[in-house]
Image: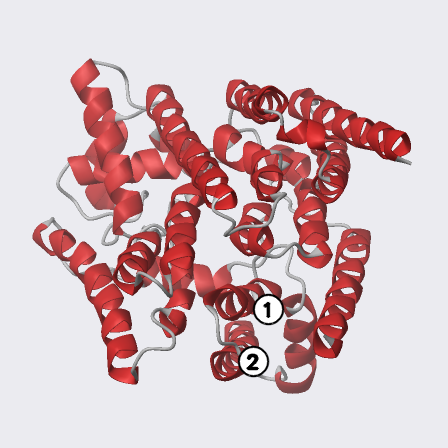
Amino acid sequence: MREALSRAWIAALCLLVGSFLCALFTGDSREAAVLLALSGLGWIVCARAHSESAQRPLVFWSVALALRFAAFACGPVYSDDVQRYAWEGEVLLAGKSPYAYAPGAPELAQLRAQLPELAPRVSHAEVPAVYPPLAQAAGLAVAALVHASGSTPGRASTWILRAFYLAADLGVLLLVLRARRAGRLAPAAPLVWGWCPLVCLEFAGSGHLDSLGILFLLLALLAAEARPLQSSIGSALGASVKLLPLVMLPWIGRGRPIAGRLGFAALALALLALAYLPFLFLEGGARGFGAGLHEYGERWESASLVYRWVEPWVLEHYGRGVPFESTRHLARVAVGCAWLLLAGWAVWRRRDAWSGAGAVLGAFLVLSPTLHPWYTLWMLPFLMHKPRCSWSWLIAGAALFYWPLSGWKSQQLWIEPAWIWWVVAPAFAALWIREALAEARA
């Protein structure tokens, strides 16, 4: 029996690594999407089987680093977000607020002329900055470093940013190893993060800033009860990268008097507000705070699980004679209200941060109009505490959402085949219901 399990584990590892490497070097996004999903299935089996071989440092680190360095060498093939990070750093270095001026704004015409390698690569040039202050500070630091070294902003900027967010990814892995040794995370936690193909693709490859936000979220989760001050600061820092760690606030210091808990939540919000303060002294001042986030919230939709069914229903029942933008806004208000109800239920019923914040964040991702593959990685800290097949399946299957990318690059058409949702969503829902019923019976 043990020999059979060992052979199955080796086969899964070969599937994980082989499919991932093939996906990096194929030029077709459809092939890459399928290969990445297969690699994700290999990752699920490896994490579930939890072979003793995987615990050997040489094996563990060889696989973890090989996947990351391969993705880093391949570059940002699946997303161009890192170009925007670099651009907004240049805007800051020029003394202007990226919240006030979109990349295509007339006020930035001179800067665009000075950065011919970078400016044309920034997508959605009509939308101002969305990312919070700490993410902007990282871009500023890289811009300053590139200029100080005499390099040309553009390729050098994106390489450094990707290296920085790869370092944050490795920081998460080191924190996971430490917490696992202390018995605070599941035994398979290092494999869940270290060998996840989507983690390697999105952070080492595409350079998404989420790795830094997840690092602070994990710090906040580990400190939520015993060290609430540290958890509050971690939540604020995480929210300064991406706002999602704010889901932690109701559970910081849980079990303490209500006044203390409210104080820790208020501290996190105050620190986040202070992080925006320096932008008031830049050209543009307070203008545009929240404008990019509002634009993103109103316009974007991609690979949604639930929202794709809500908007057509609203259009059918309430869209007659009403502008499309109004009915779309109503659909988003509807899913927003549903999320608030679920969040309120979680705050009332869930006593610890792992289950409570995980439920709120998970509901947000399920209901969100936009579910880019890297968004699903925000659930990994919770899977490292308590493994769940449902979310593991969604993380593996989310790679299929890259299927239309080649069509977008060649024709600026994003056409997602209907079958992708039917492959990913029903299985996720079925696994989630089974886990919920098992918890209810326990």
Mark before the other along the chain sequence, 1 or 2: 2
Identify which residue, 182 or 395, lies in the foreground: 182
Q: Secondary structure at mark 2?
A: helix
Q: Is residue 397 left or right of residue 183?
A: right
Residue 291 picture quarter: bottom left
x and y percent of residue 258 in the render? 30, 83
Q: Residue, x 68% and y 22% (percent of image)?
A: 21
Query: Relative to 440, does residue 304 appear above or below in the rendering?
Result: above
x and y percent of residue 69 in the render? 53, 20
Q: Residue, x 49% and y 62% (percent of image)?
A: 299
Q: Secondary structure at mark 1?
A: helix
Q: Is residue 137 left or right of residue 24?
A: left
Q: Residue, x 60% and y 26% (percent of image)?
A: 60
Residue 436 picture quarter: bottom right
Number of numbered labels in the structure image: 2
Q: Residue, x 26% and y 70% (percent of image)?
A: 264
x and y percent of residue 288 in the render? 25, 60
Q: Residue furthest top?
A: 150
Amino acid type assigned to the residue bearing label 1 in the image: Leu
x and y percent of residue 97 in the render? 19, 48
| C-alpha gap between disc 1 and disc 2 | 8 Å
Q: Are marks 1 and 2 in contact (CB under 8 Å)?
A: yes
**Residue at numbered disc 2:** 338
Q: Is residue 27 left or right of residue 153?
A: right
**Residue at numbered disc 1:** 367
